[in-house]
Amino acid sequence: MNRRTFLKSLSAATIATATNSLPAYGSVPKMKVTRIRAYLPPNPSALLYQSDLVVTIETDAGITGIGEGGSKDLLGPAAGRLIGRDPQYIERLWQDMNRSLFYPAGRERTDAIGALDMALWDIKGKVQKLPVHELLGGMVRNYCECYYTGGTIPGVTGATPIKERARAVIEAGYRGYRVGAVDLPANTTFNTRERVDHLRAQCEAVREGVGPDGDWLIDFHQRFELPDAIRGCNEIESLRPFFVEDPVRADAFLQDLPILRSKVNVPIAAGEEWGNKWDFNTLIEHHDIDYVRATLPNVGGITEMLKIAALCETHFVGITPHFTGPIATAALVNTLGTFSGPVLMEYNAQGRDLPYLPACVDFKNGKLYPNERPGLGVELDYKHLTQIAEFTEPNNARAQTYFRPDGSITNW
């Protein structure tokens, strides 16, 4: 390469950085995002953090990515940052969506970014004609084990005693049965001290149901203050729960979980209503929890889940993601199927009819299986969906970042 050719190539690279784009290499085709849409499924979830809003990212190459989560208002600002951009530079786009709009994304906007991120990974898999789990290095497990929290188990009704219900779940092939800690009807009085007194009897019935070698889990659902959480964990220690979930309030995780850890001897899982990688980092690093309840799209999508998984692997912490929607569940199988540590998936959709998803998760006998369909392996039947939003214009209003000398994004 002579001096003139070198200077021309250097100039081209400088222009690419200045225009916030990167050159395409090898056989990866260049493409641009042209439109992003959001659809309501039949009987949509009423809860934002369990949003099953369907999100699609369309490109000028005719490839459409599918994601799930967020809301119409929360998707808009981040979606506008993708219009006209090449969807294959996922990390760069994630950083831009998260950092360019002056205020860092809170939990609600992170959830929306996660929905878009899932769709970007779906596009990348479809471009490469590979499932996302192959892009991430390949599956390390034959399937993802599940524990039961809902859905239809043959022979189980609302009136089925807890012992028989636990036995039926294990017989249906699930790894474990989950029970809520001494539940009462919602919006009624819950006296935590009195309820803890009934906890052991409930858990003894569950242990008997799953058998001496079966697994069971209990969700404290943040309903106990720290002293009662300590007492409750110690009451059931000898019954060997797989883990106790969210034993204290999420607001106090960083303060109370280390205290709890020092006073109880049961495995602890936490985080279904909580945080991102910066939140989880301290709890993982200090081994104050045994299982992270991080899930998609809530933590910011596949891009961020991979980083949380790396933190967990470093400190030998497992991942037991909270359920959200069915497309996110398919994304979790693709993502956590490649994580070398312990994984246990929460599943509540056995027997549910999802006509808008002719292809989604592959569930059988209490287990979620990978498949070889490109991307996330999800297909849509649009006639069952109701479009509620469309984004076709770039969002440059107050959008601003700086770039390091090498072109990577930093804060304005």
Image: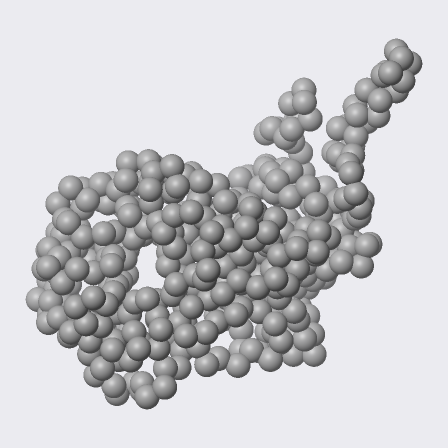
Looking at the picture, tell me which residue is in the foreground, 398 or 299: 299
Q: How is the image coloured?
A: one colour
Q: Which residue is located at x 66 percent, y 55 percent? A: 130
Extreme-top residue of the structure: 3
Could you tell me residue 55's position as x and y percent?
64, 62
How many numbered dots are placed on residues in this image? Answer: 0
Looking at the picture, tell me which residue is in the foreground, 314 or 347: 314
Q: Which residue is located at x 32 percent, y 50 percent? A: 291
Q: Which residue is located at x 24 percent, y 45 percent? A: 257
Res 169 seen here:
yes
State whether residue 360 is above or below residue 90.
below
Quadrant showing the C terminus: top right
Q: In the image, is 412 to the left or to the right of 369?
A: right
Quadrant showing the N terminus: top right
Q: In the image, is 31 to the left or to the right of 75?
A: right
Q: Which residue is located at x 55 percent, y 50 percent? A: 138
Could you tell me residue 290's position as x and y percent?
28, 48
Could you tell me residue 53's position as x and y percent?
58, 66
Q: In the image, is 10 to the left or to the right of 70?
A: right
Q: Quadrant of residue 40?
A: bottom right
Could you tell me residue 232's position as x and y percent?
13, 59
Looking at the picture, tell me which residue is in the foreground, 351 or 301: 351
Res 36 seen here:
no
